[in-house]
Amino acid sequence: MQAILLQDVDGLGKAGTVVSVARGYMRNFLVPRGLAEMATENRVAEVLRQEERRKAAEVKARAAAAEQADLLSRTILTLKAKAGDDGRLFGSITSADVAQAIQDARGIGIDRRLITVDPPIRAVGTYVVPIELAPELVAEVKTIVSPLLD
């Protein structure tokens, strides 16, 4: 019997795949728990179309992320912060500060959780800040921290 999985099932497959299962397993386990539905010709065709659309959207998003990574890799940010005479900051530069600087400089909204400022920037200087735009796609933004002159 053919079934379309609605959710990931351990040992059987991922959501949206068509699998062969025993009639009793389908009737007694998968359907009552909302894990699968009967595979009809129309429903299988619909699932395949959805999968194609998802893959196309994924490719498009990956291309856009690569374009953003290229733009961000060519970006040099300059952040100003209050600092003492020895160059140590009063506080630190956070990922939210870097995200705001990118928004101001390039007009690109980057989620601060994608930006890794580790260890925290607590001194004047030049740093390379990695930004994970997609899995296995990291852009490195050169960031210059200078003292804020009063």
Image (cartoon, grey):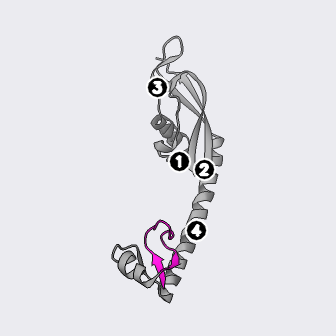
Is residue 72 visible in the rendered image? The answer is: no
Q: Secondary structure at mark 2?
A: helix
Q: Nearer the viewer, residue 81 or 4?
A: 4
Kind of residue indicated by mark 1? Ile
Residue under numbered circle 3: 92
> For the residues carrying marks 4 and 1, which lies nearer the camera in this image?
4
> Does residue 95 sit above or below 51 in this rendering?
above
**Residue 65 point in image, percent of width and height:** 59, 53
Left or right of residue 38: residue 62: right
- Per the model, the C-alpha gap separating discs 2 and 1 is 8 Å
User: Which of the 4 image quarters holds residue 62?
Assistant: bottom right
Magenta stretch bounds: 1-21
Say if the magenta span includes residue 5. yes
Q: What type of secondary structure mainly makes up the magenta span? A: loop
Q: Give the amino acid type for the residue marked by disc 3 in the picture.
A: Ser
Residue carrying label 4: 55
Q: Which residue is mark 2?
A: 68
Q: Residue furthest top?
A: 85
Dot 2, how many residues are within 10 Å of its Cα: few (below 14), some (14-19), or many (20+)?
A: some
Disc 2 + disc 1, Cβ < 8 Å: yes
Quadrant assignment, res 75: top right
Sequence-wise first label, 1 or 3: 3
Number of the front mark, 1 or 3:
3
